[in-house]
């Protein structure tokens, strides 16, 4: 186990364990993770009801405290004091690795600030699992998690993604998937994507294709399950010059024959020709 520098260690303090848990299949739990959860004094869980199912499966009955995005900062201070008393704590999220789009990062920071021993019990992570099976470039990548909800920050994030020459990984909920795909096609063009859901579960799905095809596909059926969206880098795209020489009408016909809606085709044409969307919209709506 790796600890803080010797001169900063406090032998009387307990240890904080960040414990990765399964993202679906309960068999994806390491022997070490099970042992640590049985040994610690307290398990801080994102959702105690959800974690209870995992603990019952492995016959673990340790005390639990809630530790979620709404109480993470206040609860971290409470946990720091418990660790200073010499007790050990395990941090778990509902699924995957704590701190990756889940509570955990605040506690890690506080442990370093207070010279409290902290370590990781590695395991499942949806982002890394999806990247590995996506077939996309994995030598370098950027992880954004869930895009910001406020418009300004979201627009800035999409602009950054447009410039990245590497695979980008996003998380998205099923009820927001179509909205996000439409924003992506508007901001970065019709790139290739891999959509991964239900990894390690019975209905595991790995879908590959263009963003426009994904939009058409999910227009016909409601998305279900949490999704990982993997987007090809900006320089991985082939230069699409098929439309050069097309009139606007021919350009529109090309996209509509692919099953893309008129609204989304307007965005693609504007992106292709580097023209204002309003100009293209006004032409077809005149």
Image (cartoon, helix red, strand yellow):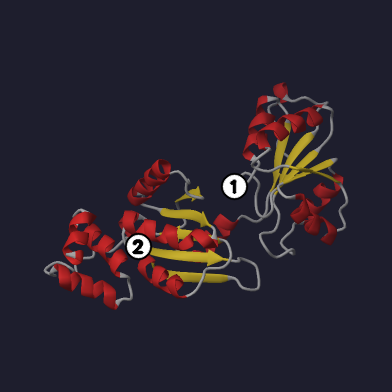
Task: State whether residue 137 appears in this view.
Answer: no
In the displayed orientation, state which residue is furthest to the bottom.
257
* x, y percent for residue 258: 31, 76
Q: Quadrant of residue 70?
A: top right
Q: Which mark is residue 197?
A: none
Q: Is residue 122 left or right of residue 282?
A: right
* x, y percent for residue 150: 45, 43
Q: Which element is circle 1 on? A: loop
* x, y percent for residue 58: 84, 59
Q: Quadrant of residue 130?
A: bottom right
In the displayed orientation, state which residue is furthest to the top.
7
Task: State whether residue 96 appears in this view.
Answer: yes
Q: Quadrant of residue 151?
A: top left
Which residue is at a point 62% across and 38% down the rendered structure image?
A: 105
Q: Quadrant of the N terminus?
A: top right
Identify the residue position indicated by label 1 in the image.
100
Which residue is at a point 83% across and 61% down the rendered structure image?
A: 57
Q: Quadrant of the C terminus?
A: bottom left
Relative depth, front residue between 285 and 138: 285
Q: Which mark is residue 191?
A: 2
Q: Is residue 68 left or right of residue 83?
A: left
Q: Which element is circle 2 on? A: loop
* Residue 193 position (above or below residue 84): below
Label 1, residues with CA under 10 Å away: few <14, some 14-19, many ≥20: some
* Residue 65 position (above or below residue 281): above
Q: Is residue 92 left or right of residue 55?
A: left
Which residue is at a point 74% across and 63% down the rendered structure image?
A: 26
- N-terminal of the pair, mark 2 or mark 1, is 1
* x, y percent for residue 230: 46, 59
* Mark 2 vs mark 1, CA separation in Å: 25 Å
Relative depth, front residue between 264 and 11: 264
């Amino acid at each position: 186990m790796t600890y803080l520098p010797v001169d900063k260690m406090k032998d009387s303090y307990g240890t904080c364990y960040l414990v990765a848990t399964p993202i679906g299949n309960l068999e994806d739990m390491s022997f070490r993770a099970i042992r640590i959860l049985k040994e610690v004094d307290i398990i801080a869980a994102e959702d105690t009801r959800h974690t209870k199912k995992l603990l019952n499966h492995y016959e673990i009955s340790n005390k639990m405290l809630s530790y979620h995005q709404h109480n993470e900062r206040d609860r971290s201070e409470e946990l720091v004091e418990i660790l200073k008393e010499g007790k050990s704590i395990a941090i778990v999220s509902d699924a995957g690795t704590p701190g990756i789009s889940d509570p955990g990062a605040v506690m890690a920071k506080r442990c370093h600030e207070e010279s409290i021993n902290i370590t990781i019990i590695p395991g499942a992570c949806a982002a890394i699992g999806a990247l590995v099976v996506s077939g996309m470039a994995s030598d370098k990548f950027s992880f954004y998690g869930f895009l910001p909800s406020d418009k300004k920050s979201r627009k800035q994030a999409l602009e950054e993604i447009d410039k990245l020459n590497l695979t980008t990984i996003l998380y998205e909920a099923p009820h927001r998937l179509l909205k996000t795909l439409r924003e992506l096609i508007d901001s970065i063009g019709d790139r290739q994507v891999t959509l991964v859901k239900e990894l390690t579960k019975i209905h595991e799905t790995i879908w590959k294709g263009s963003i426009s095809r994904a939009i058409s596909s999910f227009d016909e059926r409601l998305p279900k399950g949490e999704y990982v969206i993997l987007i090809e880098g900006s320089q991985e795209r082939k230069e699409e010059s098929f439309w050069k020489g097309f009139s606007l009408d021919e350009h529109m016909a090309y996209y509509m024959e692919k099953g893309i809606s008129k609204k989304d085709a307007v965005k693609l044409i504007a992106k292709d020709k580097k023209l204002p969307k309003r100009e293209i919209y006004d032409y077809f709506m005149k």
